[in-house]
């Protein structure tokens, strides 16, 4: 079977959803294809009763991210300030932890009420259900005629289009999609040099009934050279119906793959006990998201990528096949690469190309 649409967007993360939401206002024949059974991509907020905790990107900087600030306002979403009151801790070794009263680097960071997923939920709610095909894995794309071959719910299905927007991390589409004609070797190498943000990361959230760290005049912010958690922050939701410590696991993706999940959690709990005392053992729940295990997030090359924020190519081409295939996604943003703002920035550029 073949189904034709004016514009097909591949990838229903923030870039893909925002692009579809914007384009469908004047071009109703826009279709989103998503390999997962949900939208949002790396934006994921887990549920604990009526509270949500971010397992992907969480922070917003309104003064530096005008597109994201405008979008949250358009969607009637509220921001709240990251909790940073109190001292921070610096764990130098298993026996040495220092306490600092200096201002946190996140003093001007904000989060979204209801979690970052509130953004993608709101965008999805404003699109027709028929405009999003989930569980649709793109296997190949052909230039002439312009068509997308997929496995949709496990069955082969082909879509044709006037234009395609590829809203996926470059390493992922190079690894998983066959292009006819293929990109030249120089372009392929450029794509493979772009690390997928969040791909090597794992986040762990520890949920509590009360914020015992605040009672000790601690902000919850920790930097550790010993680990296994390298960074910890107060991740409590805006309504404070629960409290949480949100952390980044400092153990590499390769090392995590060789450790049982419960073993890793136990080691993290032991670290919290060292840092905060016995009250940390009264954990209500532990949520973990290992992005390295997500096949639709992480390419093989990403498993050996550094965990620091990567540099992204400003001058890489974003349009191919005489303007009929356009790239989007935070990895191809000219600025703010790797951030939510970059996802919107690249989407705005893709939208401009569609209008030509």
Image (cartoon, rainbow, N blue to C red):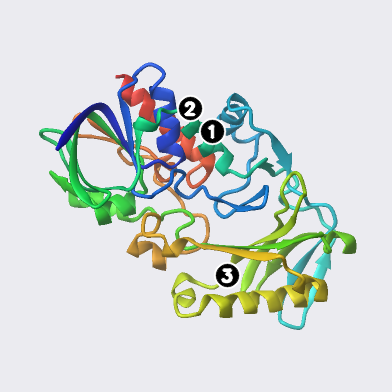
In this figure, which residue is indicated by the disc labeled 2?
126
Could you tell whether 276 is left or right of 172 in the image? right
Q: Is residue 117 above or below residue 194?
A: above
- Ranked by sequence position, the earlier of labels 2 and 3 is 2
The residue drawn where x is 24% and y is 27% is: 5
For discs 2 and 3, the disc positioned in front in the rendered view: 2
C-alpha span from label 1 to label 3: 32 Å
The residue drawn where x is 44% and y is 75% is: 257
In this figure, which residue is indicated by the disc labeled 3?
250
In this figure, which residue is indicated by the disc labeled 1?
122
Instruction: Assign the N terminus to one quadrant of the image.
Output: top left
Determine contact: label 2, label 1, CB under 8 Å.
Answer: yes
Q: Residue 251 falls in which quadrant of the image?
A: bottom right
Instruction: Assign the C terminus to one quadrant of the image.
Output: top left
C-alpha span from label 2 to label 1: 7 Å
Residue furthest toward the left?
Answer: 144
Residue 117 at x, y percent in the picture: 55, 43
């Amino acid at each position: 079977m073949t189904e034709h649409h004016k514009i097909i967007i591949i990838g229903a993360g923030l870039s893909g959803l925002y692009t579809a939401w914007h384009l469908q206002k004047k071009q109703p024949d826009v279709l989103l294809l998503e390999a997962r059974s949900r939208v949002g991509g790396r934006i994921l907020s887990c549920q604990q009763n009526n509270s949500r905790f971010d397992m992907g990107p969480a922070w917003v900087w309104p003064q530096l991210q005008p597109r994201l600030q405008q979008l949250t306002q358009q969607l009637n979403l509220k921001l709240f300030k990251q909790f940073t009151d109190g001292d921070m801790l610096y764990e130098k070794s298993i026996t040495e932890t220092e306490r600092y009263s200096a201002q946190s680097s996140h003093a001007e960071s904000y989060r979204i009420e209801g979690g970052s997923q509130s953004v993608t939920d709101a965008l999805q709610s404003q699109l027709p259900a028929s405009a999003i095909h989930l569980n649709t894995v793109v296997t190949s794309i052909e230039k002439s005629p312009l068509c997308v071959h997929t496995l949709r719910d496990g069955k082969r299905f082909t879509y044709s289009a006037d234009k395609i927007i590829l809203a996926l991390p470059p390493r992922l589409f190079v690894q998983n999609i066959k292009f006819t004609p293929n990109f030249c070797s120089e372009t392929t190498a450029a794509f493979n040099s772009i690390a997928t943000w969040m791909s090597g990361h794992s986040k762990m959230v520890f949920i509590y009934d009360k914020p015992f760290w605040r009672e000790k005049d601690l902000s919850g912010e920790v930097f550790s050279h010993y680990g296994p958690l390298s960074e910890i922050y107060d991740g409590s939701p805006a309504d404070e119906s629960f409290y949480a410590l949100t952390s980044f696991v400092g153990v590499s993706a390769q090392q995590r793959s060789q450790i049982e999940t419960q073993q890793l959690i136990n080691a993290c709990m032991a670290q919290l006990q060292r840092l905060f005392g016995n009250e940390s053992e009264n954990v209500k729940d532990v949520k973990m998201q290992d992005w390295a295990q997500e096949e639709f997030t992480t390419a093989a090359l990403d498993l050996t990528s550094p965990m620091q924020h990567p540099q992204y190519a400003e001058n890489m081409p974003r349009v191919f096949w005489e303007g009929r295939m356009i790239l989007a996604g935070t990895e191809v943003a000219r600025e703010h690469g790797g951030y939510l703002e970059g996802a919107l920035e690249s989407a705005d550029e893709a939208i401009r190309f569609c209008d030509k």
